[in-house]
Image (tube, rainbow, N blue to C red):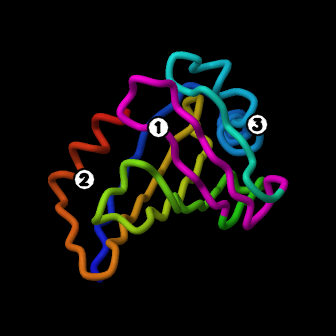
Amino acid sequence: MACITFEETLHCPVAAHRMFHAMFLDAHNLMPKIMPHAVKSVDFVSGDGGSGSIQQVNFCEGGPVKYVKNRLDSKDKDNFECNYTVIESDTFGDAVDHISNEIKFEVDLVGGCICKSKSSYYPKAGAVLNEDELKVRRESSK
């Protein structure tokens, strides 16, 4: 069962602590307000936002994705790091079992922050993942 991993580094003009807060502490409130054309709602399925909590992001009709369920694995507020796993999505099909994500926001001395992300796609038992297809999916979801 070989996973396929993608890593990305992006510069953002927003400070690291503000990005972390928006993405991982208040996303359930902010995402539907900031992106009403894409995100219908963000609901806690279980938990209160701490490790082990499960959150479902519901997307607006007409888009390529209807929903994703994320499990929070760890959150480090002091170092602006978050690890979570996408445990369910209508886009997984017969190949993807889950996606493990590691996100870190670092202070950029010239202003803003640097976002480093690592996403590892794990196949279902007996399935083989196609790296080129995953790349296309990732690009279309940005």
- Relative depth, front residue between 103 and 135: 135
Q: Is residue 12 found inside the magenta-colored segment of the image?
A: no
Q: Is residue 62 found inside the magenta-colored segment of the image?
A: yes
Mark 3 = which residue? 26
Quadrant for the N terminus, please. Answer: bottom left
Pointer 3 local density, CA inside 10 Å: few below 14, some 14–19, many at least 20: few
Q: Horizontal and vertical percent for residue 53? A: 74, 60
Q: Real-space Cα distance between discs 3 and 2?
A: 28 Å
Reply above or below: 36 against 72. Answer: above
Mark 1 = which residue? 66
Q: Is residue 60 left or right of residue 24?
A: left
Residue drawn 20% across the image and 72% down it: 128
Q: Real-space Cα distance between discs 1 and 2?
A: 18 Å
Amino acid type of the residue tagged 1 in the rendering? Lys
Q: Is residue 96 left or right of residue 111?
A: left
Sequence-wise first label, 1 or 2: 1
Mark 2 = which residue? 134
Reply above or below: 57 against 133. Answer: above
Amino acid type of the residue tagged 3 in the rendering? Asp
**CB-based contact (under 8 Å), mark 1 and mark 2:** no
Q: Horizontal and vertical percent for residue 5? A: 33, 64
Amino acid type of the residue tagged 2 in the rendering? Leu
Which residue is the extreme one toward the right?
48
Residue drawn 34% across the image and 64% down it: 96
Q: Is residue 21 left or right of residue 66?
A: right
Residue drawn 77% across the image and 53% down it: 77
Sequence-wise first label, 3 or 2: 3
Sequence-wise first label, 3 or 1: 3
Q: Horizontal and vertical percent for residue 141? A: 36, 36
Q: Which residues are magenta?
A: 48-72
